[in-house]
Amino acid sequence: MDGNFGFIVSPAIDDAPLSADVRRHDYDRYLCTLFAPRERRADLIALLAFNLELSRLRERVTELTLGQIRLTWWHETIEGVFDGHPRQHPVAQSLARMVGHYGLSRRMFEEMIDSRTKEFDETGFANLGELESFAEQTSGALQCVSLKVLEVDETEAVEAARRVGLAWALVGLCRSVPYHARLGRVYLPRDLLASADLAPSAVAAMRDGSRLEPVIEAVLELAAEHLTAARRLKPNVPPGALPVLLPATLATSYLRDLSVRKFDPFAIPGEANPTLRQLRLIWASWTKRY
C-alpha cells in the first residue's frame, strides 16, 4: 500500500471511468486492488471491469438468444484485443494495453465468457460439483489472471488464487440468494434443494431462508475447504501475490456472518460496514495474511 492507508478517506485510483464502475459494483475486490503496487492497480481494475461486464449480462437480457448474442460480441471483442484491433470500448482498450505486456492467455478470457452461458440456463446447477466448476471458470479464473498482472507465477500462488476465487464465488452466491430470489432466479444446487424438500420455485418466492440452512451450510462448507487449502499454501506463496489473495479475508468474515445467522441469507442486515472491511484488509496486509 506504499505505506499509505489514506484510501480509507479517499480510495481514488487512476483510470477513473472503469474504477468508478468497479468501485460501485465490486467494492470488496476494488479495495483489494489498492494494496497492489500503484502501477498495477489500473490493470487489475480493468480485469475486474471485464468480469463485471460478463456478470451483468444476465441482468440486462432476459432470453438465452439475446444472451448468446452478447456473449458472441464479447468473444469478438477479445479476438480484437489479442489481434491488435480492439473495439472502441473502455474495457477492450484497457485489456489491449495489457495482454502483450503480461503474456495473458486468450483461452482463459474465452473460457470466462463461455462459462456465463450457464447463467441463462433456467434449470440452474444440478449439483454442488456443477456450481463449483462454474465458480472456478469465473471467479477462480479471474483470480489467476489477476495474479499474472502482479507477475507472480509460482505454482502454489496460482493454486491459492484459484481456491480463493472459488471460495469467493461460493460465499457470494449464498449472500446473493435474496437478490436472486427477487429476480426469480435460483442458483443453489438442485440436489441440495431436493434433499431439503425444496423446489427452486419455493426459493424464488422466499422472504425467510430458515429452511435453506442445510443447503447454504453445504455450499459454505465447500467454500471453507477451499479457503483452508489456500492458506495451507501460504509458506510457499510470495508476498507479491497478497493483493489477489486478500478477498479470502473478507470471504471468511462473510462466511462467519452467515454461520452466526444459522445460514439464513435473508437474515443478513444489508451491506457490510465499509470501514470495517477496510480495516480487516489493512490488518491482513500488515500481517501478510489472507
Image (cartoon, helix red, strand yellow):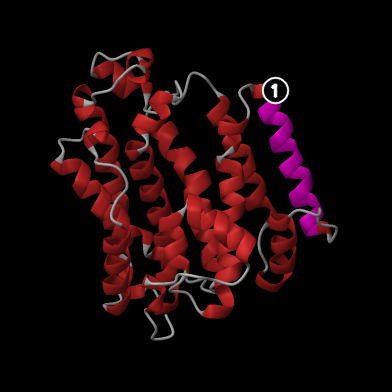
Quadrant of the rendering where the N terminus is positioned: bottom left
Q: Does residue 18 appear anywhere in the picture?
A: yes
User: For the point 28% across and 71% down, which residue is it?
Assistant: 284
For residue 237, side relative to residue 158 (left or right)? left
Q: Position of residue 164 (x, y in %)?
A: 38, 56
Q: Position of residue 174 (x, y in %)?
A: 33, 37
Examine the image and state in which quarter residue 135 appears. top left
Q: Secondary structure at mark 1?
A: helix
Q: Does residue 186 appear anywhere in the picture?
A: no
- The rendered magenta stretch, by its main secondary structure, is classed as helix
For badge 1, the amino acid type reads Thr
Q: Residue furthest bottom?
A: 3
* 230 up-or-down from 243: above or below: above
For residue 239, side relative to residue 142 (left or right)? left
**Residue at numbered disc 1:** 65
**Residue 71 within the segment the image draws in magenta:** yes
